[in-house]
Image (cartoon, grey):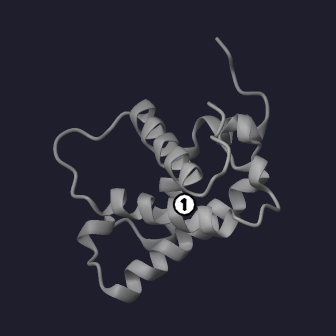
Amino acid sequence: MNLPVTLSQVVARHRGALLCMAVISAFGVVPVHAAGTAGSDTQKLAESYAAMCTKAVRIPAAHGGEGDLKGHAKLPDYCKCFADKFLARAMKPSAGAPASMEQTMQEEYGMRQTCRSQLGLPPPPKA
């Protein structure tokens, strides 16, 4: 069994769950789609997601972060793209069983890959 040995590895392996927990603690435990989608609330959520993305440059890309984009001029545009996609997914009402951690990580990787491609950035490494 490969156990994470550093905080960055723990964060990388559980990035999706940690991000969800951060959002829940920042905005309460009400699901995003149930809390209402007033324009200013939605904008605040998107800005929060983009800020979290910007902070992800502290995590090496090989561990699921955006470390390879640190200092890149397109980082703000990339983070806005990712935040918009993340918010759209978060606002979808869930049907059925919640997604597995693996499925969530794959979806987030796909969003990262799409945004990087749209902006001419290198693809994210697989964590």
Q: Against 125, is 43 above or below?
A: below
> Which quadrant: the C terminus?
top right
Give the residue at mark 1.
Answer: 22
Q: Against 88, is 43 above or below?
A: below
Amino acid type assigned to the residue bearing label 1 in the image: Ala
Q: Against 43, is 92 above or below?
A: above
Q: Quarter of the image holding residue 1?
A: top right
Q: Residue furthest bottom?
A: 40
Identify which residue is drawn at 34% across, 86% down: 39
Q: Residue furthest front?
A: 120
Give the camera-side residue of 112 and 33.
112
Q: Residue furthest left?
A: 96
Identify which residue is drawn at 45% across, 63% down: 24
The answer to whether residue 121 is left or right of residue 28 is right
Place of residue 88 in the rendered image (x, y in percent of width and height, measured from the top left): 35, 62
Q: Against 95, is 6 above or below?
A: above
Place of residue 78 in the rendered image (x, y in percent of width and height, measured from the top left): 60, 61
Give the camera-side residue of 42 and 97.
42
The answer to whether residue 24 is left or right of residue 74 is left
Place of residue 52 in the rendered image (x, y in percent of width and height, measured from the top left): 62, 63
Identify which residue is drawn at 55% across, 72% down: 48
Element type at mark 1: helix
Q: Quarter of the image holding residue 55?
A: bottom right
Identify which residue is drawn at 60% across, 58% down: 119
